[in-house]
Amino acid sequence: MSALRAAGVSKVFRFGTNIPSEGDFVSVIFILKPAVPLTENLANQIKLLKGSNLKREFHVWYVPKKNSLCEKVLEREGVWGDITFRNYSMGFIPLENTYMSLESLDFVRNCFVYNDPSDLYNVAMYLWEFQKHFGQIPELLGKGDAAKIVIELLIKIRRENEDNDSPV
């Protein structure tokens, strides 16, 4: 909360509660997972706030990134053009000194039931970001096809970034 206040946030509301439309605030930022029910709630909230006389800016930060289903919901509800979007990747969340979590509740379902490898890419990107801050991990160990894909993606990301860092 202190980081939000330092950034100039004056009031924080829990998502799903009605934001009072009478407030004198101009900018509204929503931070949410890319889920259809949450996005439908978001569209209703924006329509409610648009009904007031104040002209407002709406910003939506999807964690970790927006998806096409949410875009379609916002288009269908007629609020797509009123929103500025940003993907916000939280990365690893340290729970203890030697334990970190992605807090990705849908990882197993997305990866192994729906065969969606995007979460594996996110893991590789988080590992890359971690290594940029703390140095390269000398040995990565993993088990299974998913771990192999993550390591291959991490190597690819590392090579791409090394190429980008070289002078042209």
Image (cartoon, rainbow, N blue to C red):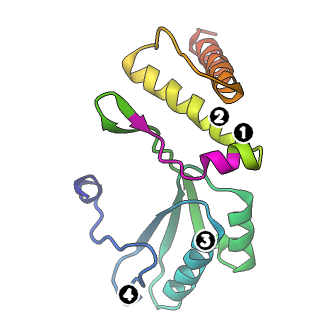
Read off the magenta span. 100-110
CA gap between label 4 and label 1 equals 40 Å
**Which picture quadrant has residue 112?**
top right
Check residue 20 in the rendering and tell me which mark sits there, or answer none.
4
Tell which circle, 3 or 2, labels the residue nearer the N-terminal end: 3
Of residues 150 and 63, which is closer to you in this image? 150
Asked if disc 4 and disc 2 are in contact, CB closer than 8 Å, the reply is no
Tell which circle, 4 or 2, labels the residue nearer the N-terminal end: 4
Tell whether 144 sits left or right of 22. right
Tell which circle, 4 or 1, labels the residue nearer the N-terminal end: 4
Q: How crowded is the residue under tag 4: few (<14 C-alpha within 10 Å), some, or many (20+)?
A: few
Tell whether 95 sits left or right of 91. left
Of residues 111 and 166, which is closer to you in this image? 111
**Which picture quadrant has residue 81?**
bottom right
CA gap between label 2 and label 1 equals 7 Å
Q: Which residue is labeled 3 in the image?
A: 39
Q: Which residue is labeled 2 in the image?
A: 121
At horizontal 48% and vertical 81% (from top left) the residue drawn is 55
Q: Which residue is labeled 1 in the image?
A: 117
